[in-house]
Amino acid sequence: MFFDGMEKLTVLELNEVRMLQLPPSLANLVNLRMLCLNECQLEDITILKDLKNNLEVLSLRGSDIKALPSEIGQLTQLRLLDLRDCNKLSKIPQGVISNLSRLEELYILDSFVQWEDATANKERSNVSLDELRKLTQLTTLHIHIPNAMLLPKDICFENLIRFIISMGESFDSFEYQSSTRMFKLVGVPFRDEFNVLLERAEVLHLEKVEGLQKVTFPALEQLNIYGLPKLTEIWDRKLPPPESFKELWDLSIWSCKKLVNVGLSNMPRQLPKLRALYVAYCQELKVVVLENGEENEKAENNTNTILFPQLTGLALLHLESLKSFCTSRSERQSLFTSQVAFPALEVLTIWELHNIIEIWDKQILIASEKESKSFCQLKDIEVSNCEKLVQVVQFNMLPRLQNLKKFNVDNCPRMEVIVSEKEKEEGTTTNDIIVFSQLTTLNLFELVSLKSFYNWPTRYEAQPLFNHQVAFPVLEDLKLQKLPNMIEIWDRQLLIASEKESKSFCQLKDMKVSNCEKLVHIVQFNMLPRLQNLKKFNVDNCPRMEAIVSEKEKEEGTPRNDIIMFSQLTTLNLSKLVSLKSFYNWPTRSKAQPLFNQQV
């Protein structure tokens, strides 16, 4: 027999094995303490009852077992039972769970949801949640309860140290973190028994919960507030108990339509470890941080700055009433003023803020020592669907953005420039070079009013997108889509390069140009030496484009037989270019030209 002579075996793992019936010799393993049958094809496991004297750990995780036999209730020495990912499990007989009185760890999650009502006047065939009350030594519980009405009134979670508990709606896969204490309530009336879970939870998801009372959260690390339509404020105007929220680092607020602010100016003191703040779809939110009386009095004397010292990620999405991040006394509606500072911020995402006219107030540039490093760690900016925004950043703000690596601007219909013209100061010139020294990715999409990246002084109405005053020495990915006013990508003056900008665009590897209706060519011949690292080149739906590379400008005494070489190019896509005559517009007497001639 298979297990004969193995009586001293204490641990056995038989994972990913097909065993419709466990071998009878398994009963001989009288000293077995741990048995793992993970991801096995199982039918009859009744024989496990013979291991009742010593078996302490039983894992059936991921197996296809459909019913747990009642004999499992005889394993009274069990300390751990793992039924996670048993997606076919539909029956756990009444009394099995309650018999396992020494159980310390129970893992079920949403593998089993057929809990029966213990109060119903009918004979039950399946387990009820009432049996959990018998597990007085339970310290770890992973369970999903689809109907909280099935939970007994005097259930006690006091002994739980580790838990993943969801009621009403299970955790989505993306919500699972490395945390060992997670609690989710969706559409469930709040009960006093839940207080201990709220206080101990590190990840908390509350959605459509009624009856929530004041409670402290000393261990809470992540807080998700979703779909609370009557919520107007999150925190009391007084500071909560000092032990509450001290560990919170991730705060997400979604679809709270009556919420008017996220917190007061004491918010950084309330949430000293806050690293990520996400606010979306709150229609009446006017400010994120509201100044209260005491703080407002100090602000009048310009003696305080609201500092978020650890915040690295900030997303403000679909906030149609938002006027400013912090209460502003300025008539001009700037998202960020000198009243607030973010010295550690790395990712900034802004979508559909219809009232914002500018992102950074001009006063922020007259920086105090505390805020002089605000935004200096910014690596990723995304601005989308801000209909009143006419530029992203003022020229004088650029020194703070030298760590920027990704820059995305999308669908801002009034935006004319990305960087506004430098304000004239007495004794200064306007020929400064703008260098984005770390920027590797730039996407400009559906900017119907965009005239140029930088609004530099010129006599001409038509401007190239990039002029000689803008440099991108490490840019690798450039995407330009739906820019109807763009007639030229690179200025001819760019080719007369200063030392600072001579390497601009030289690291470009991936370029896509799409739906730019006035563009007649992509690149001038003289620009090609800078594009020798280009690997992917996509041009799509530019109806007036006649050539990808424009003809070389005539220079006295020079021939025109230069060879155009794209030495690194591996992918070239040309699509829907109805006016395209040739890849390179070379001089010829013939009207008909091949796409690729001998000079490419």
Image: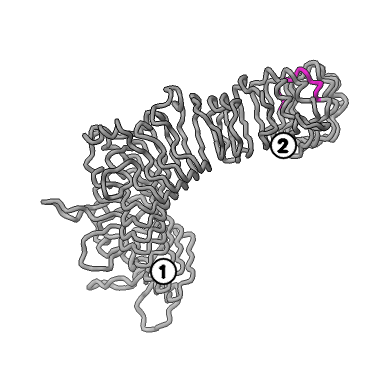
Looking at marks 1 and 2 on the same chain, the residue that comes earlier in the sequence is marked by 2
Quadrant hosting residue 552: bottom left
Q: Nearer the viewer, mark 1 or mark 2?
A: 2
Name above or below for residue 428 compared with residue 143.
below
Q: Which residue is mark 1?
A: 600
Quick check: is 381 in the magenta stretch? no
Q: Please state the horizontal and vertical placement of residue 80, each as a whole percent of the image.
A: 70, 23
Q: Amino acid at mark 1?
A: Val
> Going by the image, does 548 lie left or right of 81?
left
Kind of residue at badge 2: Val
Q: Which label number is shown at residue 448?
A: none
User: Which percent across, then down, holds residue 13?
Assistant: 74, 27
Q: Quadrant of the N terminus?
A: top right
Q: Residues within 10 Å of mark 1 (few under 14, many from 20)?
A: few
Residue at (85% x, 22% y) in the render: 27
Q: Vertically, is 480 above or below 95?
A: below
Highlighted magenta segment, given as a residue range: 72-81
Label 1: state its secondary structure.
loop
Q: Which residue is mark 2?
A: 113
Q: Quadrant of the C terminus?
A: bottom left
- Let me know if residue 37 appears in the view: no
The reply, left or right, for residue 442 in relation to residue 14 is: left
* Front-most of residues 146 and 83: 146
> How far apart are the alpha carbons under marks 1 and 2?
66 Å
| Residue 372 location (% of width, % of height) | 26, 37
